[in-house]
Image: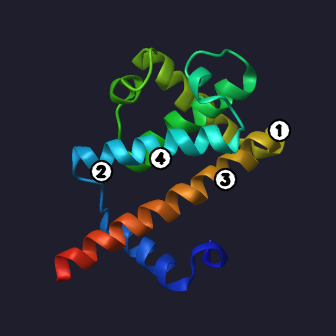
Amino acid sequence: MIGQIGLEQTMFLLEGFINNIPIKSESGKKVASHYIIDTCIETFFLNEKEFFKNGERDYRDARYCCFYLMHKYIGNTSVKTASFSNLTGRQVQYGCNVTKERLAFPKFHSEFIANYKDIESKIVAMLVKLTYRNDRRREQ
């Protein structure tokens, strides 16, 4: 990660996780959620209009990554995440569980894991920038 975002931002990110700095505002959560959705669509090379409708494996995998990352980094509940689509909270929870299981056995899901890591690194970099900007504003 240091090679991707630099030592200073990595240290700042780690301090943020240690201090548990969440995205507090609803507008910030909404922006971060849309960024995660867009990043999943881009990484899996999908059609944006079909993202929440298509049942093909790539679309499902991208949605599962999206749901898990929204829960992990934004703290969205399954119901809150489902509000971005026509899905239910149970479907979102199922996607989170599938992602957890796949992360536990990366050897068997190498393509999924590669896409997940790519998406996660982009999201972490975005969250570092948001947190850094907010801290700099507070200092001024």
**Inter-mark Cα distance, 4 to 1:** 28 Å
**Inter-mark Cα distance, 4 to 3:** 15 Å
At 67% from the left edge and 54% from the top edge, which residue is drawn? Answer: 118
Is mark 1 in CB contact (under 8 Å) with mark 3? Answer: no
At 66% from the left edge and 78% from the top edge, which residue is drawn? Answer: 3
Q: In front here: 110 or 59?
A: 59
Give the residue type at disc 1.
Answer: Phe
Instruction: Look at mark 3 in the image and give the residue it sits on.
Output: 117
The secondary structure type at the circle numbered 1 is helix
Sequence-first disc among 2 and 1: 2
Give the residue type at disc 4.
Answer: Tyr
The secondary structure type at the circle numbered 2 is helix
Give the residue type at disc 3.
Answer: Lys
Crowding at dot 1, Cα within 10 Å, few <14 / some 14-19 / many 20+, comes out as few
Q: In front here: 122 or 94?
A: 122
Instruction: Look at mark 2 in the image and give the residue it sits on.
Output: 28
Residue 35: mark = 4
Sequence-first disc among 4 and 3: 4
Crowding at dot 3, Cα within 10 Å, few <14 / some 14-19 / many 20+, comes out as few
